[in-house]
Amino acid sequence: MKSALLREVLGESLREQRFAQGRTLREVSSAARVSLGYLSEVERGQKEASSELILAICTALDLPQSELMRIVSDKMLKTEGSTEHRITVAA
């Protein structure tokens, strides 16, 4: 299995959170003060989101950044675990 890019996992996680709240792209983009098109690209993993933009989107979703990072981290661990790439440290 191919490793996912961080921007893809982040975008997917933001979209899942928005869907879970039953909110539209327009509602969240307006609340985050980011264009609808740009937010859509972030959610689809086509654009890298700056830390400022992540904060704005999390605030619009009433989602702590730490919770978003936990969600993203859990997904990345699953992806990386399935690639069977292991780092061995010599003692």
Image (cartoon, rainbow, N blue to C red):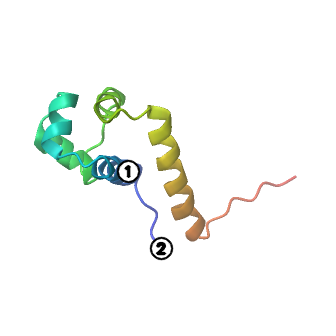
- Reply above or below: 35 against 46: above
Residue 47, horizontal then vertical, whole percent = 25, 45
> Which residue lies under the disc numbered 2?
1
Q: Position of residue 18 (x, y in %)?
A: 29, 47
Q: Is residue 82 left or right of residue 69?
A: right
Q: Residues within 10 Å of mark 2 (few under 14, many from 20)?
A: few
From the viewer's perspective, tell me whether residue 70 is left or right of residue 8.
right
- Give the answer, above or below, for where 71 lies relative to 67: below
Question: In the picture provided, is 58 more to the left or to the right than 69?
Answer: left
Q: Nearer the viewer, residue 24 or 81?
A: 24
Badge 2 or badge 1: first in the primary sequence: 2
Q: Residue at x 54, y 53 (%)?
A: 74
- At mark 1, the secondary structure is helix
Camera-near label (2 vs 1) is 1
Residue identifier under label 1: 13
As drawn, which residue projects farthest toward the right? 91
**Horizontal and vertical percent position of residue 88:** 75, 59
Looking at the image, which residue is at 32% across and 32% down? Answer: 50
| Quadrant of the rendered image containing residue 53 | top left
* In-front residue for pair 34/83: 34
Disc 1 packing (10 Å; few <14; some 14–19; many ≥20): some
The structure residue drawn at horizontal position 47% and vertical position 48%, both measured from the top left corner, is 72
Please give the name of the residue rendered at 31% of the width and 36% of the height, measured from the top-left corner: 61
* Residue type at the position of mark 2: Met
Separation of marks 2 and 1 at Cα, in angstroms: 19 Å
Q: Is residue 74 above or below residue 51?
A: below
> Tag 1: residue type?
Ser
